[in-house]
Amino acid sequence: MIDDHPFALCLTHDVDRPYKTYQSVYYALADRDPRQLQSLFPGRNPYWQFERLMEIEDSLGVRSAFYFLDEQHLLRDRPVRDWFEPDNWMRYMGRYSLDDPAIVDVIHELDEGGWEVGLHGSYESYDDRERLRREKARVESVLGKPVRGGRQHYLNLDVPETWRHQRAVGLKYDTSLGSSQSYGFQYGDSIQRPFDDEFVVFPLTIMEVALPDPTKHFEEAWAECERLLAEAADRGAVMTILWHPRYFSRRDFPGWGALYRRIIENALDRGAWVGPPVELYDQLDHPTDDRFDEPTGDRLDEQVDAEPESTVHESAE
């Protein structure tokens, strides 16, 4: 175990759309709710939830990882044929820039406060090593130091090639192995070492959108989370969860922030190690370390027996 903790809970956040733009029009039309358009007014942005998220975690004495995206611009960076695909408009609209002073400021604030800043590889980068390398360099140019891990956008994976690309550009871990449609330990309850070296995969246990909607069914959603926490404690598992920052908006997603807080509180009550993946990574015994021993069944860092088949997962945006 890690410092005698019964299990580990890794906290992660993919920074996809910190500004509510086209979503305001979509929900206004879909829900016949013109109040959604108020988000377009100056000074109103319900998806910018970094402060609330940091307040929750700071009050509980924990930290997490934030993965930032260097996404392409549809009209500037993509071929003309892509302009006529409706899915591409949804995929690329509402993007943010790493040159945005507010984004730069929050990256520095997170880093200075002890949070991990990592890479959210763009939709195309899972099979494009040079693009991934450039995106990592862009995040590092803002952060001012190397990033060591992250997650691919939409959970895109070509296994094991994506991991080879990540390792080649200098990443130490990935957290993309998971699903937006289901939750649990179907991808494993411990870290994986696909190349029997220091590169590590943290399987994703919960992405928030896969759970019952706590806005309408809070106790049902909590029962599923509590079940998984109990299972993690029984297994001595490494449990990784993903909450997108926009889900901390009380107005747009009531109940989601409270559910996240309760998960952390329950994990701490059970004696779990709680924090960002990079901190857990640094506590593991790695093959390149003098401390490395053959893994055993009761270790949090059990090796993977075989490489999974190639697959591409898509997450809800």
Image (cartoon, rainbow, N blue to C red):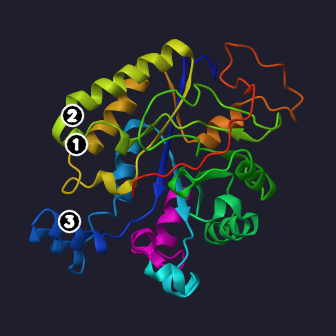
Give the residues in magenta. Answer: 85-111
Amino acid marked by disc 3: Tyr
Instruction: Look at the numbered disc 2 and give the secondary structure of its residue.
Output: helix
Q: Indicate which disc, 2 or 1, sits on the residue closer to the N terminus.
A: 2
Amino acid found under the numbered disc labelled 2: Phe
What residue is at 52 percent from the left and 64 percent from the top? 107
In this figure, which residue is indicated by the disc labeled 1?
A: 255
- Classified by dominant secondary structure, the portion drawn in magenta counts as helix
Q: Position of residue 231 (x, y in %)?
A: 46, 17
Secondary element type, mark 1 = loop
Tell me the mark number nearer the camera, choosing from 1 and 3.
3
Residue for point 42% across, 23% down: 228
Q: CA distance from mark 2 to mark 3?
A: 22 Å
**Between discs 2 and 3, the one toward the N terminus:** 3
Determine whether, in the image, residue 188 is placed left or right of residue 286.
left
Placement of 313 over or under 119, stated as above or below: above
Marks 2,1: beta carbons within 8 A: yes
Q: Nearer the viewer, residue 277 or 157?
A: 157
Q: Which residue is mark 3?
A: 27
Between marks 2 and 3 in the image, the one whose residue lies nearer the viewer: 3
Q: Does the stretch in magenta take in 110?
A: yes
Reading the image, the residue beneath label 2 is 218
**Crowd band around label 1 with a 10 angstrom C-alpha radius: few (<14), some (14–19), many (20+):** many
- Badge 1 amino acid: Gly
Which of the two discs, 1 and 3, labels the residue nearer the N terminus?
3
Are there few (<14), some (14-19), or many (20+) residues within 10 Å of tag 2? some
Could you classify mark 3 by the number of other residues whose Cα lies within 10 Å: few (under 14), some (14-19), or many (20 or more)? some
Please give left or right for residue 254 compared with residue 170 in the image: left
